[in-house]
Image (cartoon, rainbow, N blue to C red):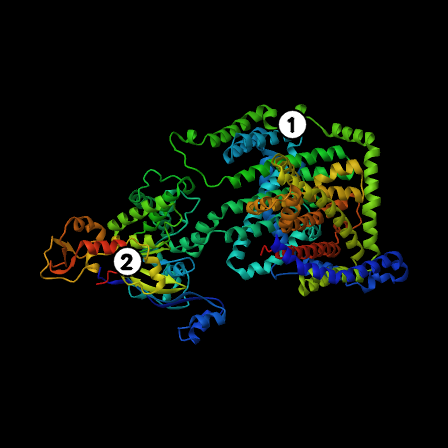
């Protein structure tokens, strides 16, 4: 995963209310909750610092009103942040002119919306080709390109239908196809599956993972569903009251929740599906007889059968094949029933 | 319910506190009623001319200056307006030629027809095709039937002249309304500045601005069309702003993210997404344009409106009714057609195979019928225009029928009329006229203060003093009396009807159809049967106003009852409420804010109808406006029009405040 930073935001604030900018300046870019309250202002996003790496799925997770939608709209500059910097490939977006911003959005960004935001008067084909149309791509070329993405999301044959003739899941596939039509490098998804039924949601998540394996985009994914975050994310940022409380991989959040609030979310997560052998290993014992080797990055749920059947522990090995710890039956049980496992 | 009672308490206490005041106010009023005219000086009832504020002279002088002296250097103001009129003449005369007169070469009686107009068969085919395209065969049959009616009953020529002016006025009104609406959406400051202007435009009676239009644009179909556009545009502006604002934020966000420029965002994203709402506006513009048909004929529009007006003036009630029914038929056809278009939603996908003709059966039929009847029409006249020998005139028999009713039921009708006049209308009129204006305005201010506080008092004071200062007080009181009486009756009939309709599904459907039809009728049409039955006078005016204004009272009551959350009603039932308790303790209080809104609408419609009833001999502000129109006295007409608008605005603001207060008491936020 270690690679270049695609999008970074530094000290981003979004304060709603009168004279928010001068308020932020007079408080040295660091007003507290009390300051905001006494000035009658609302802190939508408070001092957000994020670095998003090329090709990763970065999930911003928070309950309603936590500021996650505001933050993603700041990142795409749909909302003008009150202060801070948003840097896309070295360029500060907040300093870009309207014209530059239009160009950036036309070529580098795509966005999927919670309620699909399809244009009711256009067909599936027209909707998907729309971002190309506003760029002035000729009809034939843009329709060919649109047909490609429509096929990619599995909607071939529905090109000439109108949005209202499709089911929710299909509509969101159109939304996804449309956001991919311009081949963006940066892909924003704002609660894309929240308006769907649970079963369809599951199916769409699988579809999303499949797409990302093909496309390898840099993704900012917003959700209020912690299970969804765990399932999809490379890294997760948890937000509350406009603040980012913790950023980390799913396993890191489960193992070391920064606050009680984060722990509350992780408590009900099936840990065996998140934790890896390397994270829960016991100390290595030279003398122990082992039944075999387990890669450090294998998830417990996947190795549980194997470990369970053997009376001897398994050795946990790193990428070079060097043993770094042990995993026994008891350890697997510890993970499954939720006992303390920090080594 | 417990919550509601607790909230009511301070209100009740407040009420008892001011009860003493109202008792003494009542006593003083009675005193004024008996002795006022004798004891108080005359200026307390109507301001003598020398004390009046000569606003009407200012306006007339300004108008004179505008039409005579105002100049932009290269051309005068009047030349500019006449130029605009000439520009608009083009599309209008084209539409008239196409639908009615045919294309002519030369002037006046020497004119030679070079191309005939569309044949009646092809016009009928076009509307049937549109009906089918917009919805289904049923609508196609209805619309086709309406147009056939016009042909069979001998109203075709006039109807086509009317249709031509509508066909041109509506796109102008829609386009202008949409553009102003877009500007209002984009610049909130602009919206705030036009909002009071729109209020005024919708409350000042049309008659009031017919005179200035006459001055600026001359007499004729074009001036009539301009008046129509001005009258029909305000709702389009409002609806445009509202539907643009109603486009979901996500769609707007998407537009930005797709990299739209401002223009692309407006025309490719916002306007198409707002289309269903905008189509409602188009329907409104069509209906209001039709409503203007008769009034516009006063400044030179021909067609059905002119037929009605001239019949009314001749007291040829049969002929007036005939043309009036034709307007209604045309209105129903256009209303249903435009509503179908607005409810059509986004199109659905259809497989396109086969030739052009197979894919566009309707377009092909329309073109074929048009060309076919054009060629055939040269040899067979009855293809071109509906044969006169087959026309059916119903004017005579209608007049006969009315005569029969009048003779047979004279006693019954007359006794109803007398009872209502003596026991209800005349007393109200006397009370209003016998109060000195200062006392009335004082009482009005007290009520405003109770409802809305100091700002409402300031508004009512300013507006009512304007009416006094311009010497309109007495006439205004007659307007208030006629309007008040009609509104009371309309409410007493309409609200219970609405409640019944909301409770009873079947009755609801019937009432819905009646109300829809009533709302489709142009206001003038109500006058004809009423005058036939009750002759001219206050009572006829009242009946016409009630008929015209009852629709919102019913509609809002239905809506008010239906919008109550079912959970609240279930809560009432499970608490053991009887049906009666359910109605009085839960449904009515919760529907009250909506009912008040309906009352507001009823008052607005009543005021706009009052001006028209001036034609049947009332003595109020409407008459003043009408006289100003016949004398082409700009200032007088506009001042009287403003007075009516101010009455409307006072009523509107007071009811809005009352409604807000009721909502607050009910804890509805």
Image vertical order of residue B632 relative to residue A279, above or below? above
Give whichever of B387, B204 is nearer the camera. B204
Q: Chain of mark 2?
A: A
The C terminus of chain B lies in quadrant: bottom right
Residue wearing tag 2: A250
| Residue B392: % across, % down | 69, 26
Circle 2 — which element? Answer: helix
Residue at horizontal 52%, vertical 50%?
B243
> In front: mark 2 or mark 1?
2
Quadrant for residue B410, please give it: top right
| Residue B585: % across, % down | 65, 48
Residue wearing tag 1: B152
Report if residue B119 is visible in the image: no
Circle 1 — which element? Answer: helix
| Residue A179: % across, % down | 34, 51
| Crowding near the residue tagged with mark 1, few <14, some 14–19, many ≥20 C-alpha atoms within 10 Å | some
Q: CA distance from mark 2 to mark 1?
A: 79 Å
């Amino acid at each position: 995963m270690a690679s270049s930073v695609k999008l970074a935001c530094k000290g981003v604030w979004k304060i709603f209310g009168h004279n928010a900018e001068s308020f932020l300046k007079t408080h040295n870019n660091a007003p507290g909750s009390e300051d905001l309250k006494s000035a009658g202002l609302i802190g939508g996003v408070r001092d957000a610092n994020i670095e998003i790496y090329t090709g990763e799925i970065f999930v911003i997770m928070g309950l309603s009103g936590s500021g996650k939608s505001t933050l993603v709209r700041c990142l795409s500059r749909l909302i003008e942040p009150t202060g801070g910097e948003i840097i896309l490939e070295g360029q500060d977006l907040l300093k870009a002119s309207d014209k530059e911003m239009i160009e950036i959005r036309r070529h580098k960004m795509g966005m999927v919306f919670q309620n699909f935001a399809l244009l009711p008067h256009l067909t599936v084909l027209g909707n998907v080709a729309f971002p190309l149309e506003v760029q002035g791509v000729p009809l034939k070329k843009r329709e060919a390109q649109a047909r490609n993405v429509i096929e990619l999301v599995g909607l071939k044959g529905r090109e000439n239908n109108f949005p209202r003739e499709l089911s929710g899941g299909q509509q969101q596939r159109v939304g996804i196809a449309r956001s991919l039509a311009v081949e963006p490098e940066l892909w924003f998804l704002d609660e894309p599956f929240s308006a769907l039924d649970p079963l369809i949601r599951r199916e769409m998540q699988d579809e999303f993972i499949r797409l990302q394996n093909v496309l390898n985009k840099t993704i900012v994914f917003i959700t209020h569903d912690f299970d969804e975050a765990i399932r999809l994310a490379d890294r997760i940022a948890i937000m509350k009251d406009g603040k980012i409380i913790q950023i980390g991989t799913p396993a890191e959040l489960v193992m070391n929740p920064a606050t009680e609030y984060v722990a509350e979310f992780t408590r009900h997560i099936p840990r065996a599906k998140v934790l890896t052998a390397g994270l829960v290993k016991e100390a290595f014992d030279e003398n122990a007889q082992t039944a075999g080797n387990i890669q450090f990055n294998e998830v417990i749920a996947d190795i549980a059968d194997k470990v369970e059947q053997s009376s001897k522990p398994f050795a946990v090995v790193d990428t070079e094949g060097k043993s770094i710890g042990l995993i026994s039956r008891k350890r697997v049980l510890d993970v499954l029933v939720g006992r303390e496992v920090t080594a | 319910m417990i919550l509601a009672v607790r909230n009511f308490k301070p209100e009740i206490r407040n009420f008892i506190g001011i009860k003493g005041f109202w008792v003494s106010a009542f006593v003083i009023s009675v005193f004024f009623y008996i002795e006022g005219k004798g004891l108080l000086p005359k200026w307390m009832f109507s301001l003598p001319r020398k004390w009046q504020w000569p606003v009407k002279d200012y306006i007339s002088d300004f108008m004179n200056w505008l039409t005579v002296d105002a100049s932009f250097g290269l051309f005068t103001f009047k030349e500019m307006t006449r130029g605009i009129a000439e520009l608009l003449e083009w599309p209008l005369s084209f539409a008239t030629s196409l639908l009615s007169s045919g294309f002519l070469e030369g002037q006046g009686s020497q004119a030679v027809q070079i191309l005939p107009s569309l044949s009646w068969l092809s016009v009928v085919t076009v509307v049937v095709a549109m009906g089918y395209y917009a919805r289904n065969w049923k609508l196609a049959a209805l619309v086709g039937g309406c147009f056939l009616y016009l042909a069979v009953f001998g109203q075709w020529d006039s109807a086509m002249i009317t249709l031509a002016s509508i066909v041109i006025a509506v796109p102008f009104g829609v386009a202008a309304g949409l553009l102003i609406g877009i500007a209002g959406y984009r610049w909130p400051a602009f919206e705030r500045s036009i909002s009071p202007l729109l209020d005024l435009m919708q409350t000042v009676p049309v008659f009031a601005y017919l005179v200035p239009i006459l001055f600026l644009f001359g007499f004729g179909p074009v001036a009539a069309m301009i008046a129509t556009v001005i009258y029909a545009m305000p709702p389009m502006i409002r609806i445009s702003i509202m539907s643009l604002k109603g486009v979901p934020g996500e769609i707007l966000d998407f537009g930005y993210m797709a990299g739209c420029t401002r223009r692309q965002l407006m025309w490719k994203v916002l306007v198409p997404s707002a289309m269903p709402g905008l189509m409602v506006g188009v329907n409104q513009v069509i209906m209001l344009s039709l409503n203007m048909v008769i009034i516009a004929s006063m400044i030179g529009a021909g067609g059905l409106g002119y037929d009605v007006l001239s019949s009314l003036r001749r007291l040829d009630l049969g002929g007036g009714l005939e043309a009036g029914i034709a307007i209604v038929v045309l209105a129903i056809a256009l209303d249903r057609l435009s509503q179908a278009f607005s409810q059509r939603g986004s199109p659905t996908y259809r497989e396109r195979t086969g030739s052009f003709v197979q894919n566009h059966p309707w377009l092909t039929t329309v073109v074929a019928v048009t060309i076919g009847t054009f060629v055939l029409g040269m040899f067979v006249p009855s293809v071109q225009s509906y044969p006169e020998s087959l026309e059916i005139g119903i004017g005579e028999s209608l007049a006969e029928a009315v005569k029969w009713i009048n003779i047979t039921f004279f006693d019954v009708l007359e006794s109803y009329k007398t009872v209502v006049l003596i026991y209800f209308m005349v007393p109200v009129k006397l009370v209003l006229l016998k109060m000195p204006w200062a006392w009335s305005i004082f009482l009005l201010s007290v009520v405003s203060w109770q409802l809305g506080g100091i700002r409402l008092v300031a508004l009512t004071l300013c507006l009512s003093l304007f009416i006094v200062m311009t010497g309109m007080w007495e006439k205004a009181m007659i307007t208030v009396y006629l309007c008040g009486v009609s509104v009371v009756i309309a409410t007493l009939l309409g609200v219970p009807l609405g409640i019944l309709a909301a409770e009873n599904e079947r009755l609801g459907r019937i009432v819905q159809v009646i109300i829809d039809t009533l709302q489709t009728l142009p206001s003038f049409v109500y006058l004809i049967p009423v005058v036939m039955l009750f002759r001219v006078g206050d009572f006829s005016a009242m009946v016409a106003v009630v008929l015209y204004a009852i629709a919102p009272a019913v509609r809002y009551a239905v809506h008010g009852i239906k919008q109550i959350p079912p959970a609240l009603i279930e809560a009432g039932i499970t608490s053991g409420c009887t049906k009666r308790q359910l109605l009085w303790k839960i449904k009515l209080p919760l529907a009250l804010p909506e009912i008040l809104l309906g009352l507001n609408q009823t008052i607005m419609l009543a005021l706009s109808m009052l001006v028209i009833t001036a034609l049947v001999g009332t003595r109020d502000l409407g008459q003043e406006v009408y006289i100003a129109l016949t004398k082409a006295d700009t200032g007088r007409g506009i001042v009287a029009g403003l007075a009516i608008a101010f009455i409307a605005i006072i009523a509107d603001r007071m009811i809005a405040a009352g409604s807000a207060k009721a909502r607050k008491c009910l804890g509805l936020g």
